[in-house]
Amino acid sequence: YFCISCFLTSPDYNHSHKDIIGIFDLDTATVSAKTRDFLNKAEKEGKTVTVSLYELPRSFTVTAKNKEEQKIYISPLSVNAVAAKRFK
């Protein structure tokens, strides 16, 4: 079981605010074929990190220091919960 609070405070996820490109709701964002293609490509390239394998994913956060260091964190937390933790 992966600790959600560990995810939010993990060194791997501890990006500065300028590295966060966006926090997106999976239900609404994946309506677009372009978003689905983006996520599928990122997964194939090993750029996705799934936070919990035991809970349904609700949001994803796109981060990048540069194009090569882009990561997508898929989380069971809602967009509001992730934003509240990251931007408090």
Image (cartoon, helix red, strand yellow):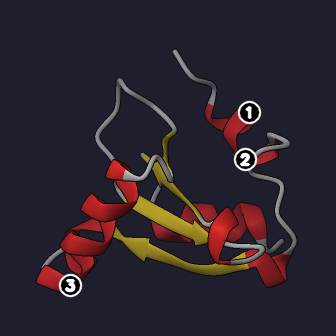
For disc 3, the marked residue is 34
The residue lying at 63 percent from left, 26 percent from top is 3
The residue lying at 42 percent from left, 46 percent from top is 76
Q: CA distance from mark 3 to mark 2?
A: 27 Å
The residue lying at 73 percent from left, 77 percent from top is 66
Three-letter code, disc 1: Cys
Q: Which numbered disc, 3 or 1, marks the residue that appears first in the sequence? A: 1
Q: Nearer the viewer, residue 64 or 80?
A: 64
Three-letter code, disc 3: Lys
**Disc 3 residue crowd, few under 14, some 14–19, many 20+, Cα 10 Å:** few
For disc 1, the marked residue is 6
**Of discs 3 and 2, which sits in the foreground?**
3
Residue 62 coordinates in the image, percent (x, y): 55, 70
**Disc 1 residue crowd, few under 14, some 14–19, many 20+, Cα 10 Å:** few
Q: Nearer the viewer, residue 88 or 65?
A: 65
Question: Vertical placement of 27 versus 76: above or below?
Answer: below
Question: Vertical placement of 10 versus 38: above or below?
Answer: above
